[in-house]
Image (cartoon, coloured by chain):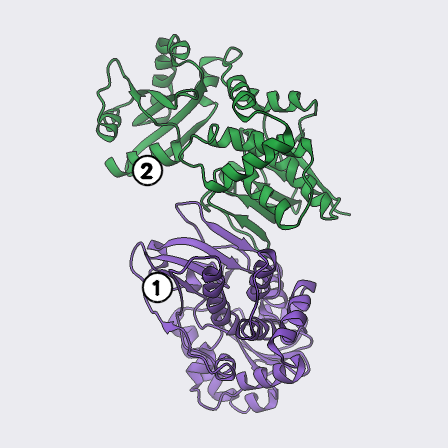
Chain colours: A green, B purple
Amino acid sequence: MEEILIFGHKNPDTDSICSSMVKQILNEKNGKNNSKAVRIGNINKETEFVLNYLKTEAPELVEKIDDGQKVILVDHNEFGQSVDGIENAKIIGVVDHHRISDFKTSEPLYYTSKPYGCTATILYQDFKAKDLTIDKKEAVLMASAIISDTLLLKSPTTTKHDKIALENLAKIAQIDVESYGLEMLKAGTDLSSFSIEEILNLDAKQVSIKDVKTIVAQVNTASIADVMKKKTELEAGINNIIDEKGIDLFAFLITDIINSNSQVIALGKNASLIEKSYGVKLEDNTALLKGVVSRKKQVIPILTENA
Amino acid sequence: MEEILIFGHKNPDTDSICSSMVKQILNEKNGKNNSKAVRIGNINKETEFVLNYLKTEAPELVEKIDDGQKVILVDHNEFGQSVDGIENAKIIGVVDHHRISDFKTSEPLYYTSKPYGCTATILYQDFKAKDLTIDKKEAVLMASAIISDTLLLKSPTTTKHDKIALENLAKIAQIDVESYGLEMLKAGTDLSSFSIEEILNLDAKQVSIKDVKTIVAQVNTASIADVMKKKTELEAGINNIIDEKGIDLFAFLITDIINSNSQVIALGKNASLIEKSYGVKLEDNTALLKGVVSRKKQVIPILTENA
């Protein structure tokens, strides 16, 4: 039978990896044995923690796919965030929780999208709707994805569905959500092996905010002070990117996952948009944004309103 | 509470009307009382038969929507097939069984698509998944939509899911599928009250097939010969549309619902695409396409392959 590849987005996060693996299992439980989870980028430190916890291997790396390859996308739909060659693939299914954009097919397909905090929450509901049992490994994968995407249910993207799913999954997974979750999130904050350029690119999204060419990059940390030790080098790296790409505003968010705040380093000729948007004063290019953790909900729309 | 409008595509067919009405009921059964089925075009004769059978009113006509209006789309997603103003609406949900194209949102949303023969089959499964009861009226609405879209389960778009749904719905609806279905389909073939322009627009879809600007219009009939009596007037009407809209290929399908064939009238500078696609010779602009009944499965993809 023809193989179907299942994968999440580029620069895969824990939801992209775990939901691919769970979707493969879900298909198998539904009697479809020809699908295979793969990844289209490197495993990050947080996901590595999850895979080590489960003593399981990461999905195989795939960097380009053939024309006509059957695929299922999880945790993304925009072709710009997908694998090279996606335009000529045969997309037979999508499970996602993002806006729909830069996406099209020539045939009808399975598409399940819900405005939840995490793809894995949708998969959890699929298990429930079909009365399928969830084993410990599957529960750890889904719980880890939810903890990651919702920052331990503290991100404003969190819905009641994510909360219910995580509560039930934690029981099956036999994990204490707080302690397991913090350990997992902290593993993801280990920046020691990355260069300044890599740190600035780990999770960077370029968007046009009205006519302001903006990059909002983000790293999670358990200690803002620790990351701020590299402030001078980070600023130099940011200024290089601004010059190279003609960026008007580069906002680098250092997000404290314990206290749910972000320290922003803002550079570029439109840096004052940060001041106007959050009622703060940038001192030496930086300010604390209290309660801000979600780029999707608390940064892009606020900057857009104030631009 | 803010009202949510639910509607199907332009030139609504029975699935578009019935699935809008059923989606409203489904929302209500899920405790959401602020949604309202509407329609964005005239009711056809087939749907009129269904509404008369149920002694129920058609949904209200809406021709344009306001910026920011919350909407749920059923039975379509392409903006070109939707209501005027859709670009600035807030699309919170879609239930559909077509390819995804010409569609985007700025926010995450509910999107359920399955490659089934009919939207109502997806809604039927939603009732089942949530253990909701289906009453007689709801069963008639969904059964009628399935009969219409699958031409009594004879169209190649039919899946086992449509068959199972129709079988179960027919019992609740207390209808004999064959006799009710044929009567309903035949009601839809009554073209006596329509002008030539109206006939050509009853179920017309404009699509770009590579760079060929194409309209594929379709009418159902119990007698191809009956419709072909108007061939001269139909051709004049088609040529008017071609001139007005700059169409490269207008394919008018006259589909025999008893014998499952279609007579095509093809005009426009790319009319030969029909010959190439089906291995037929257009004589006097027309040819019989044996076994062809589905625009979605047997026309659009075949033309696309051959364009």
Disc 1: CA contacts within 10 A as few (<14), some (14-19) or many (>=20)? some
Nearest the eye: B261 or A100: A100
Q: Of circles 2 and 1, which is in front? A: 2
Can I make out residue B270 in this image?
Answer: yes
In-image side of A195 versus B3 (left or right): right
Q: Quadrant of the C terminus of chain B?
A: bottom right
Numbered disc 1: secondary structure: loop
Can I make out residue B102 in this image?
Answer: no
| Image height of A86 relative to A247, above or below | below
Which amino acid type is marked by label 1? Asp
Query: Residue B11 sits in which quadrant?
Result: bottom left
Disc 1 sits on a residue from what chain? B
Instruction: State the residue position of label 2.
Output: A301
Q: Position of residue A171 (x, y in %)?
A: 61, 32
User: Mark 2 and mark 1: span between their CA atoms?
Assistant: 26 Å
Which of the numbered marks, if any, corresponds to residue A93? none
Q: Quadrant of the N terminus of chain B?
A: bottom left
Q: Position of residue A182 (x, y in %)?
A: 51, 20
Which of the numbered marks, if any, corresponds to residue B84? 1
Q: Position of residue A96 (x, y in %)?
A: 53, 43
Which amino acid type is marked by label 2? Pro
Disc 2 sits on a residue from what chain? A
Q: Which residue is rendered at x = 60% and y = 68% of the image? A: B299
Disc 2 and disc 1 on one polypeptide chain? no
Q: Which residue is rendered at x = 64% and y = 33% of the image? A: A172
Nearest the eye: A275 or B209: A275
Q: Position of residue B148 (x, y in %)?
A: 58, 75
Disc 2: CA contacts within 10 A as few (<14), some (14-19) or many (>=20)? some
